[in-house]
Image (cartoon, rainbow, N blue to C red):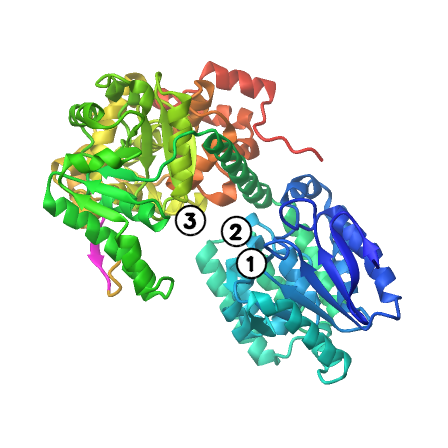
Amino acid sequence: MLYKSDSFEVSFIKENIAEFKFCATASVNTLSQQTLSDCATALKQLAANTDIKGMIFTSDKEHFIIGADVFEFLPIFTRSEAELVTWIKEATDVFDAIEDLPFPTLSAVNGLALGGGCEWVLATDYRVASETAQMGLPEVTLGIMPGFGGTVRLPRIIGADNAMMWITSGSTNRAADALKVGAFDAVVSADKLIESSVSTLELAIAGKLDWQAKRNVKLQPLKLNRVEQGMSFAMAEGMVMAKTKGHYPAPVMAVKTIKAAANCTRDEAMAIENANFAKLAGTPEVAAQIGIFLADQYIKGKSRKLAKQSDVEIKQAAVLGAGIMGGGIAYQSAYKGTPIIMKDIQQDALDLGMGEASKLLGQKVKRGHMSMEKMLGTLSKIKPTLNDSDLQSADIIVEAVVENPKVKQAVLAELEKTMPEGTVLTSNTSTICIDLLAEALDKPENFCGMHFFNPVPKMPLVEIIRGAKTSDKTINAVVDYALKLGKSPIVVNDCPGFFVNRVLFPYFAGFSKLVVEGANFAKVDKVMENVFGWPMGPAYLLDVVGIDTAFHCTGVMADGFPERMARADKDPVTIFANEKRFGQKNKAGFYKYETDRRGRLKKSHDETAIELLKPITEAEKAFDKQEIIDRCMIPMLNEVLLCLQEGIVASPQEADMALVYGVGFPPFRGGAFRYLDQTGLANFVATADKYAHLGAIYQVSEQTRQWAEEGRVFYKVEG
């Protein structure tokens, strides 16, 4: 044994060739501060060992190294910029030490090499990968950029354009694709990985491969002349700004860093990366995006714990009600491996549901992500039927019929009578109280809500709604099924609209009041998209949700919360619903829609919409951007706070992830509670008080006021 620590060990794998094996006691290999410190010590000793003529880096885990230990990030990032530069340079010195070893080095990459793991393999002279390996630099998804030499080495290995694409997108790249651009030197079957790696090192040691020339490329400036640099960096900067709208500083900083270091040696370039990484690390966007990662880990851990407690084995699922939603649920279940029965009373609906599933699978075949054989096998896991008797084999049934409480109650009551003992019953309602639906059941303990978001395959969130009499057994089983579907389940307590829709409709109400007072809805959309960062402004989102759906939900919310959410006398949604302008589904709502050459709906200005709104709106008036944001967001944030105070949602983490995953709350803001922390609860209350005269949705609760006085912070970071 040449060296041993808690996370790696070094020994000779063959005469004169050392194997540096990552073997952390945890289930995966990560780069913690302790690991890097141990590596620094080990590398000094190994560099001085004249018996070593080459070194291979391996992993004893399923994956090579999945990145740095994110759980150490937030406390470190509270340090001053100068302290961060010192910290990050100490880390990058380790990677430089790998690159400066006096003998050839090679990474044998199995599984994932991400973030710091990817930067580790970039520091070695050669990179051989198994066929299933993947590599990438996903740091921008956390609000940072590669900080262990990724912006320096990757452009010099695969070219500046390819590197900027990898880094700014945060993409994970398959072995074959990485090989094409030169990130991997060879790709072999898993059983040949070590053998091929050792053979490559032997060729380098024997002088048959010029490892020093290969290394030297990474130590020198980029091989681009000034004209090529100008074109490459200008195009990259333009593309990144167009995509991020300036909300995400990390990809912009990454491009600037590569540009600034283009004509520098490695050490000069590393100093630039160190400085720019430190500048990024202290930004609110980093706290927000790493906070999302940690919150996601929190909800996943909570879900896994509940799922492990389930004693219901779900071998067969069923969805009652086909069409687009039913077809989406059926597709997701079959695609993830759980056979599903799709039941409806109309053959046309079943045809529509199967058509939806076939379309989704066909797109995967077209993109090369699935074979035709696998597509047919997946489709065979969906059984369309008109017969109630076919439901007898289901372990869980998702009711997804029309959003009408009486219809749902009748369907659920009939299901309960006929289904076998122990079958779990759920309703895919978006707003109707679970307790109301449960009134029709003899055994409400076996029933809960399972609210999918549309489109089902793309939306990660599933709200699982616990009724007053829902048993833990039922919740555990439904959480387990949601995880099997590849979804992120969040358990909430029952109320009209549950959590996501309950907080979304006050946001719509604030927007509608602005429009009635003379705000141009298209300008409001631009502010909420380009300034606040929503993927869609409220008018556009209403068109996507469906004006008819929004009108129905507004009625449910008005009945449930008459003081705060009563339907307004002057309401744009009501006007459009009465005119049967239902948004994208019939190509007319706030905007008009046309299908482009790729089959996507494109919105455009519609003068008819403006004319229809004139009877209920005042003369057009210009509103300050911040006022637009405040008047839309305060009602939503007030309702989010109430949901936490009332126990509808259990934690800030679950609330924030529900909003990010369910309605696209801007990730760079970190969710509603992270946003409140960064705004300051006292500042939020003061701003809300300015608009309190506009109605109950702007008036903060006494609990919120008390929290503000106490200086309540929802996320605490220890420095």
Kindly report the distance in space between the C-alpha atoms of the residues bearing marks 2 and 3: 12 Å
Q: Is residue 338 magenta?
A: no
Q: Label 2 neighbourhood size at 10 Å, few (<14), some (14-19), many (20+)? A: many
Q: Amino acid at mark 3?
A: Asn
Q: Position of residue 661 (x, y in %)?
A: 42, 41
Q: Position of residue 238 (x, y in %)?
A: 48, 64
Tell which tag, 2 or 3, sits nearer the viewer. Answer: 2
Q: Name the residue: 25% across, 38% down.
A: 319
What residue does disc 1 label?
A: 252
Answer yes or no: do the residues labelled 2 and 3 have beta carbons within 8 Å? no
Q: Is residue 710 left or right of residue 625?
A: right
Answer yes or no: do the residues labelled 2 and 1 have beta carbons within 8 Å? yes
Disc 2 on helix, strand or loop? Answer: loop
Up the image or down, 312 lies above or below 645; here it is below
Kindly report the distance in space between the C-alpha atoms of the residues bearing marks 1 and 3: 16 Å
Q: Is residue 445 left or right of residue 669?
A: left
What residue does disc 2 label?
A: 248
**Which of the 4 image quarters holds residue 73?**
top right
Q: Is residue 381 visible?
A: yes
Q: Name the residue: 19% across, 34% down.
A: 401
Q: Quadrant of the C terminus?
A: top right
Q: Amino acid at mark 2?
A: Tyr
The range drawn in magenta is: 590-596
What residue does disc 3 label?
A: 530
Q: Amino acid at mark 1?
A: Val
Disc 1 on helix, strand or loop? Answer: helix
Q: Position of residue 203 (x, y in %)?
A: 72, 80
Q: Position of residue 656 (x, y in %)?
A: 47, 34
Marks 2 and 3, the one that precedes in the sequence? 2
Q: Of residues 520 and 472, which is closer to you in this image?
A: 472
Up the image or down, 234 lies above or below 662; here it is below
Q: Is residue 401 left or right of residue 177?
A: left
